[in-house]
Image (cartoon, rainbow, N blue to C red):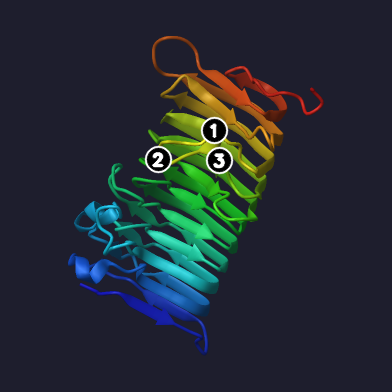
């Protein structure tokens, strides 16, 4: 059993931190109403390894996620948070049943996650696998993530992100956003490749609030991704709303230069490709290439749905593309 622990630099040199056995978080509500359980701050040169397991014992905390009923506990702790970390590697550790996010990454540069296993029940609230913001040069490689929320989520300030070799499910998919809650939120230069998503709510997703402040998501590439019974394999949602009633106003976040290449497999809904973009800031430079998504239910083939989306489609297009050429009026 380990209570909240915060390891703060700067340090005189590189640090190797080993996690062995099963490390358990407290279940007493008076002890877990914090933003983090285990965190590292202001370290240049950090390695976290050891083959051990961080057990957040989240079932004790998930009922407190509804802050409208539990105002005394406004936030639940992230299992492992990296804050202002440079040149780090996190590998060969496990996280189960996190109370909130498994791993949080904030204001970091040059961090690699590899061979990590992050799991929580599919109905557990807000248990994102890896959640990153205001961070650059982040790699997530060769890992298994199954949660009750996004397997990997990238919000404001995520730049130069490389994700490869991820098996995701259950969960809400690999997501950019939501963006637009505050002004000038930006995500750029994201590459997601060689991943498998199994029975997730979404596959490759970009989401923005509506209405929203200004912002952008640019230079995004989803490539060589296999979808197995995914509800929304390819989705851009610029009318994201987490709790009705929802506004019909348009998003002010510009989505531009997004490629979906060699996306194949099965969709659990007929809507295999949904590009629901903003009327005020239509999506530009969307590229669909070699799309082969089959609806695995009854009632008809998979379909594409496009609103305010401009770009090109090449190669196999199943379902048939509904994109408008950027030259179309």
Q: Earlier in the sequence, mark 2 or mark 1?
A: 2
Q: With 142 as the anchor, is 285 left or right in this view?
A: right
Circle 2: element type: loop
Q: Which of marks 3 and 2 is nearer the N terminus?
A: 3
Q: With 100 as the anchor, is 29 left or right in this view?
A: left
Front one among 92 and 83? 83
Front one among 151 and 246? 246
Q: Mark 2 points at which residue?
A: 243
Label 3 CA crowd tier, 10 Å (few <14, some 14–19, many 20+): many
- Residue located at (38% from left, 46% from top): 149
Estimate the x, y position of residue 164 in percent, counting from the top left.
54, 48
Q: Do the residues labelled 3 and 1 touch (CB within 8 Å)?
A: yes
Give the image quarter of residue 4.
bottom left
- Residue located at (30% from left, 65% from top): 52
Estimate the x, y position of residue 112 in percent, counting from the top left.
52, 63
In the image, residue 326 above or below residue 319: below
Label 1 CA crowd tier, 10 Å (few <14, some 14–19, many 20+): few
Residue 303 makes an appearance in the image: yes
In the image, residue 258 above or below residue 305: below
Q: Compute the Cα span from label 2 to label 1.
A: 13 Å
Q: Name the residue under label 3.
A: 210
């Amino acid at each position: 059993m380990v209570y909240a622990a915060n390891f703060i630099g700067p340090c005189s040199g590189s640090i190797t931190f080993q996690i062995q056995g099963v490390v358990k978080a407290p279940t007493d509500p008076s002890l877990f109403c914090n933003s983090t359980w285990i965190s590292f701050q202001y370290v240049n040169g950090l390695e976290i390894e050891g083959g051990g397991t961080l057990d957040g014992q989240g079932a004790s905390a998930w009922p407190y996620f509804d802050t409208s009923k539990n105002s005394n506990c406004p936030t639940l702790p992230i299992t492992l948070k990296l804050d202002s970390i440079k040149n780090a590697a996190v590998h060969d550790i496990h996280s189960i049943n996190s109370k909130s996010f498994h791993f949080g990454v904030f204001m970091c540069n040059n961090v690699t996650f590899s061979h990590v296993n992050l799991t929580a029940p599919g109905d557990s609230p807000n248990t994102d696998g890896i959640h990153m913001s205001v961070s650059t040069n982040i790699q997530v490689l060769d890992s298994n993530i199954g949660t009750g929320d996004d397997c990997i989520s990238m919000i404001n300030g995520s730049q130069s992100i490389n994700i490869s070799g991820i098996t995701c499910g259950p969960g809400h998919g690999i997501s950019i956003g939501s963006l637009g809650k505050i002004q000038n939120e930006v995500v750029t230069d994201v590459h997601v490749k060689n991943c498998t998503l199994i029975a997730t709510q979404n596959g490759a997703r970009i989401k923005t609030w509506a209405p929203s402040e200004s912002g952008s998501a640019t230079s995004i590439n989803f490539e060589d991704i296999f979808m197995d019974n995914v509800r929304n394999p390819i989705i851009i949602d610029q009318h994201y709303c987490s709790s009705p009633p929802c506004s019909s106003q348009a998003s002010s976040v510009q989505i531009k230069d997004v490629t979906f290449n060699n996306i194949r497999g099965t969709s659990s809904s007929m809507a295999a490709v949904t590009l629901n973009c903003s009327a005020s800031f239509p999506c530009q430079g969307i590229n669909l290439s070699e799309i082969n998504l089959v609806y695995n239910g009854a009632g008809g083939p998979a379909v594409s749905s496009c609103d305010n989306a401009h770009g090109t489609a090449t190669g196999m297009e199943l379902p048939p593309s509904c994109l408008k050429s950027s030259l179309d009026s």
